[in-house]
Image: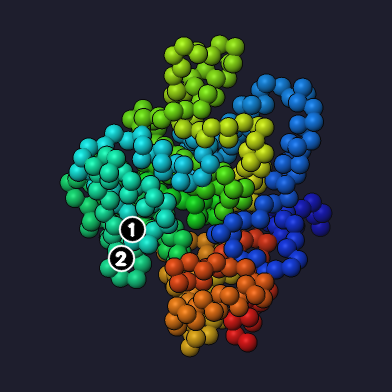
Amino acid sequence: MATATTPMQTDWRQEWFEIEDATYLNVSGQSPMPRVSIRAVQAALEAKKSPHHMPDSTFYEVPNRIRASIARLIGGKPEEIAATSGASAGVAAVAYGLPWKPGDEIITAKSEFPLQYTTWKPMEQREGVKLKIVAPRERFITADDLIAAMTPRTRLVSVSLVRFDDGSLLDAARVAAACHAHGALLLLDASQCCGAMPMDVHALGADFVVSAGYKWLLGPFGTGFLWVKSEHLQMVRPGPFYWMAVAGSDNFAALNFDDPKPAPSAKRWDAPEWASYFNFNLVAMDASVEFVERMGPERVLAHNRKLIELLFERLPKDRFVLASPLDAAHRGPYGCFAARSLEKTAEVYQHLRNENVVVSLREGNIRVSPHLFNTERDIDRLISVVTP
């Protein structure tokens, strides 16, 4: 009998510190960081005691490693990755970087995550563009809804790949094909699935992808990325850029201070002071994304689908309605449910929190987002609380 532990035998629950005082089912809100990421931060703190031991290359190795890890995770290239402070920063870079014409249309969906409105509404006054908000014709927003809203003036469709409020998964490839047929671009917010579902940006057909780092990528707040398709790198104008995002910044002694040019890669949109080893967010993100790679998004998705199917099976149908697509192929890595009224849903949510079952209340739905540290017992615990 083999004694070595294989990847299939790994007890992934041991990779996190145990949450002893709660049943945590809220990775879509924020993830607990794995042990390896906490250790990385502790090591970085220790290193600051003796900064003279750090070689200059440290400034570049960690952010470059993150770019490479994220690129492998989403099927892109390292030079297409910008290290941002979150999804909002990535969308803002696109918003202020694209050349707009008065009358250009930007399409998003009704009840999208708020960053879509806080980014695009001010652009109406600034650039003379029009934000078109599309409502679903049935229960969930679909590719057909977005495609039907496109016109010859449509310049960009900006939506979530997985919705934050109901977990529905968009058929992004169909939207992308329609966008490109109209001469438009597609921006996807992958915050609610990147790291928990296999992703290939080219199969999705996206032009831009953004993601927060503190959810399914298991990193801290203040982290994220922007992916820009290679052919758009020179089209999207950089704003004021971080001094380490200049061309040739890997050789400080040869920096051009008289006429600095942005790096030819997506590094030009790096968040200031973020892409440095000495930012503890960065070392945590480095360890977290490497851990996500090792763990495998496909493993997270398969595990979560089993738990959400169990949840959907055991919820009393006379008291609750399922608020996510029943077909797992049309759903992200989590699921939502609701009581028979908004008021009752809010009461159930508060009862869960009072009983230390940590979930989210989003747009009138209770969102349940587990991870590999969760088991069927956690779903049983939730069911026992909502069905006393």
Q: Amino acid at mark 1?
A: Ala
Q: Quadrant of residue 108?
A: bottom left
With 172 as the anchor, is 53 left or right in this view?
A: right
Q: Residues within 10 Å of mark 2 (few under 14, many from 20)?
A: some
Q: Which residue is mark 1?
A: 109
Residue pictured at 54% horizontal, 14% vertical: 255
x then y, percent, for residue 236: 35, 32
239 and 327: which is toward the camera: 239
Residue that lies at the very extreme toward the left in this rendered image: 152
Q: Amino acid at mark 2?
A: Pro
Residue pictured at 36% horizontal, 52% vertical: 117
With 2 as the anchor, is 134 left or right in this view?
A: left
296 and 59: which is toward the camera: 59
Of pointers 1 and 2, the one earlier in the residue sequence: 1
Q: Quadrant of residue 147?
A: bottom left
Quadrant for the C terminus, please: bottom right
Q: Are marks 1 and 2 in contact (CB under 8 Å)?
A: yes
SS under mark 2: loop
Q: Is residue 355 above or below residue 275?
A: below
Residue pictured at 36% horizontal, 67% vertical: 140
x then y, percent, for residue 1: 81, 57
x then y, percent, for residue 137: 27, 68
Residue pictured at 57% horizontal, 44% vertical: 222
With 257 as the anchor, is 143 left or right in this view?
A: left
140 and 239: which is toward the camera: 239
Q: Is residue 351 above or below residue 133?
A: below
